[in-house]
Amino acid sequence: MIVQDMRCVLDFLHGMEYAFDGLKIGRNEKLWKNWFDKEAPEEEILPNAYDQSLDCFRRLLLIRSWCPDRTIAQARKYIMDAMGEKYAEGLVLDLEMTWEESDKHTPLICFLSMGSDPTDSIIALGKKVKIETRCVSMGQGQEIHARKLLQQTMTNGGWALLQNCHLGLDFLDELMDIITETESIHESFRLWMTTEVHKLFPIALLQMSVKFTNEPPQGLRAGLRRTYCGISQDLLDVSNMPQWKPVLYAVAFLHSTVQERRKYGPLGWNIPYEFNQADLNATVQFVQNHLDDMDIKKGVSWTTVRYMIAEIQYGGRVTDDYDKRLLNTFAKVWFSENMFASDFCFYKGYSIPKCNSVDQYLTYIQSLPTYDTPEAFGLHTNADITYQSKLAKGVLDTILSIQPKDSSNGGGETREAAVARLADDMLDKLPVDYIPFEVKEKLQKMGALQPMNIFLRQEIDRMQRVITLVRNTLIDLKLAIDGTIIMSETLRDALDCMYDARIPAQWKRVIIKR
């Protein structure tokens, strides 16, 4: 099976001139099997000299075909090779630059995701530029307070922050009118909004706004970089205790770890908790206070530190017993006198640097691995297979979904013509309907009350529903393409899915109900 699949892949990748090279795989199957079994095959040399003959993109196609869970890792290498390293790195949100791009008539809308509330960052930016920020959390009956806040800030200046606007959708049309129709607005006025994605959110408001999101970065390096980009030199130097900087780095590492484990689903946390910037800020403030009040002769009370981190600051969100046990284990292993030893490391390659400035920390963080093995989070390497496979499928499905849906593609075969041809082919291959009385007669001869025959009858009925649905969809789709009937939303989905070689959603629902 491996030999057959690999021959097909190589024939596709390399063209007919290399078609006979697939015979090499049969003679070197062990080499290919060893390459396939590697933890990171995209980093290994391809057998049969294909490493020299395949460029980065063709290698991506090969990895996608044979090792789907390694697709994203190879795609990142391709992006770095084609566009540069900076395009493969996560971008740290610069709220100040976002604010500078806005004006008094342009709201700034942040789309919320788990663990990414920008409220503290917006308030901190307001203090930095010496502008007062006042907030209203939207919900039932909050429109009165929102109107009052807008009136005051538009007249006297300042920033208005409306949180969770998806809970006050009825007010948003009025809000848009207030912004566009009010003539006299203070120059320092800005309207910040946070909302979850909602299909009823006014499109016109989105079009007139600056839109951004503040999702937690992917990977330890990106997470640590975002944390230290938000740390000032004054905070780094706020304490002269030698324990301050290492403990601060350990807290930042723990924060990135608990967020990263969430992507592994139930393997990471039994319940997905919304660890966010507020947890980090509270923990940093506690550590600072504890070191300021510490008796130098007694030293750090690690029992207190571990309890506050694992039971209060981060543990306050945790409700599952096993998740609480995991968090306590992280605190026990990472927060002790051992963390100041020269040989201490969170995991191989992840140690605590000895730095004196934020820039030095950022330089060290930039040297960390781009890709984090699950073992860095305390997980088995197999935990990454399911996550990476789902991530690759999600990325490719998204790419397909945003492809142009135009009827014409430059004079060639149109999408509708291609789908109509495919529908004809599928109708020709579709089995004929089961005839009920013939099925009943044959089952009677076989013994209708035999357990396996009862099961067979149920399966025939279910299969008939699938065959009927597929046949009706294909016939209606052909009629809709010809213009005989209206192209409904269900038929449009079927057309798009068939063109993209995917199963239509309606067919999936029937198959699952079986």
Image: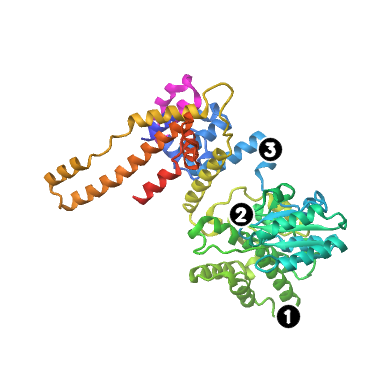
- Give the mark nearer the N terminus: 1 vs 2: 2
Element under disc 3: loop
Identify the residue under disc 3.
84
Distance of mark 2 from mark 3, alpha carbons? 35 Å
Q: Is residue 504 magenta?
A: no
Element under disc 1: loop
Q: Residue at x 86, y 54 (%)?
A: 183
- Give whichever of 233, 48 is nearer the camera: 233
**10 Å crowding of disc 3: few (<14), some (14-19), many (20+):** few
Which amino acid type is shown beneath numbered disc 1?
Asp
Give x and y (percent) for residue 296: 74, 78
Element under disc 2: loop
Q: Is residue 28 magenta?
A: yes
Which amino acid type is shown beneath numbered disc 3?
Gly
Identify the residue under disc 2.
198
**10 Å crowding of disc 1: few (<14), some (14-19), many (20+):** few
- Give whichever of 268, 26 is nearer the camera: 268
Secondary structure mostly taken by the magenta-highlighted segment of the chain: helix
Which residues are the magenta region?
9-31
357 up-or-down from 62: above or below: below
| Apparent side of residue 236 relative to residue 256 in the rendered image (left or right) | right
On-image quarter of the N terminus: top left
- Give the mark nearer the N terminus: 3 vs 1: 3
Numbered disc in front, either 1 or 2: 2
505 up-or-down from 501: above or below: below
What numbered label is drawn on residue 295?
1
Residue 27, image quadrant:
top left
